[in-house]
Image (spheres, coloured by chain):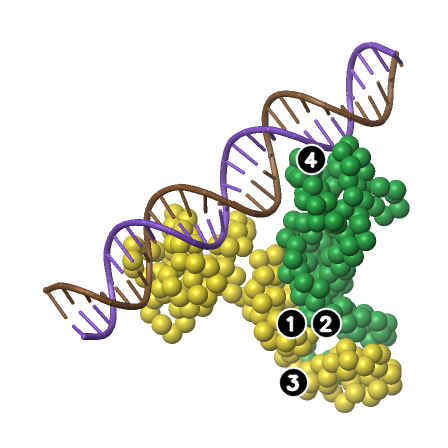
Chain colours: A yellow, B green, C brown, D purple
DNA sequence: ATAATTTGTTTGACGCGTCTAACATTTGTC
DNA sequence: GACAAATGTTAGACGCGTCAAACAAATTAT
């Protein structure tokens, strides 16, 4: 689980796995568009990833992940999703902003943190009876400040 | 609140404000050690920050933040602290790892996210009666899996 | 099937942040 | 105060990731 890849290379791998959903294979132009970089950047990134055995890419052809590349791409994607969901569904950050922030933060999350974060999201969101009040309370706290203790207690007792 | 500074430059500013605590002024060597870079890197970063009006630094002299630099440094520091506390005190990530992760993530947090995150930490930690059970429950969830609903209810009713 | 368009690659350049090696200044010591 | 040690700077190089310009292949339209 050593994180020996740069943020950029992780972004390329992640974008490949995301673009591939449903479709057969991925084109350079798609990656370029998805990441907001020009095509030469993609070409050169792919050469590098190819040398590292993470993607398959023949000239003018489609791009595919090797098993190793797939593994890493999924890992990055999971980090991204955990962060995005935490921001959007728990902190109630605007979805657009949550996605953007998650995309930058994902590269900095250690395995230990990732594990805890994933558990935390489960913990907070998985109990449907608790979750709505809880998050509503938080939202109220964000917008209007402290919540009277008695209200807190009353609401939570309803679980 | 436009984030127009690189992660590196933010790190330099943050390290200056952190090293300055208590002491009078900050030396290049201290920054170098704190950030794990060689002194020439510090010198060149300071030149850049100086041109941008964020630090005061005369040759062979001490380093100080300008009001602008101070503002930004504090902002970075607050992001760092919010993340570190979230990871360490809520997710219960190992403190060392939490600090390291926070230090890398801090550059990716938008103002909107920062605001919500700070509120969230307050919300979770500020009510001393609720907080210990709540976090203990999460910890148990992390280590042993799902918690029976009735236990959950019983524990939370105690608030 | 040939021309026009879209897609992809190569080349060479640049900015950023880092480093080493060599040099300069300041500080501490005798 | 001179010398040694510690501290800081300059100069020049490098890796990374990006880009624009020029070129090449593949695709689409006529």
Q: Nearer the viewer, mark 4 or mark 2?
A: 4
For the N terminus of chain B, give its image quadrant.
bottom right
Distance (Cα) linking label 1 and label 2: 9 Å
Q: Which residue is mark 4?
A: B39
Horizontal side of residue A102 vs B141, given as left or right: left
Mark 3, chain letter?
A
Mark 2, chain letter?
B
Does any portion of residue A82 appear in the rendered image?
A: no
Q: Which residue is mark 3?
A: A128
Depth check, front residue: A116 or D17: D17
Depth check, front residue: C14 or A65: C14
Name the residue located 59 percent from the left edge and 61 percent from the top edge: A104
Q: Position of residue A83 (x, y in %)?
A: 61, 67
The answer to whether the residue labelled 1 contacts the one labelled 2, judged by CB atoms less than 8 Å apart, is: yes
Q: Nearer the viewer, mark 3 or mark 1?
A: 1
Q: Which residue is mark 1?
A: A87
Q: Position of residue D14 (x, y in %)?
A: 50, 35
The answer to whether the residue labelled 3 contacts the one labelled 1, judged by CB atoms less than 8 Å apart, is: no
Upstream in sequence: badge 3 or badge 1: 1
From the viewer's perspective, is residue B154 above or below residue C2?
Answer: below
Distance (Cα) linking label 3 and label 1: 19 Å
Q: Position of residue B101 (x, y in %)?
A: 66, 55
Q: Secondary structure at mark 4?
A: helix
Q: Which residue is mark 2?
A: B116
Mark 1, chain letter?
A
Mark 4 surroundings within 10 Å by alpha-carbon count, few (fewer than 14), some (14 through 19), many (20 or more): some
From the viewer's perspective, is residue D7 above or below residue A79?
Answer: above
């Amino acid at each position: 689980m050593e994180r020996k890849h740069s943020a950029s290379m992780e972004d390329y791998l992640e974008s490949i796995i995301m673009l591939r959903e449903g479709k057969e294979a991925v084109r350079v132009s798609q990656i370029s568009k998805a990441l907001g970089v020009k095509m030469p950047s993609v070409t050169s990134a792919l050469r590098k990833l190819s040398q590292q055995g993470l993607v398959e890419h023949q000239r003018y052809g489609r791009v595919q992940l090797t098993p190793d590349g797939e593994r890493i791409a999924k890992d990055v994607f999971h980090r991204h999703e955990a962060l995005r969901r935490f921001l959007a569904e728990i902190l109630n950050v605007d979805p657009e902003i949550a996605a953007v922030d998650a995309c930058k933060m994902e590269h900095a999350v250690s395995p230990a943190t990732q594990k805890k974060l994933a558990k935390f999201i489960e913990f907070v969101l998985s109990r449907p009876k608790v979750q709505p009040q809880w998050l509503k309370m938080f939202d109220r706290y964000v917008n209007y400040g402290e919540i009277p203790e008695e209200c807190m207690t009353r609401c939570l007792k309803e679980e």
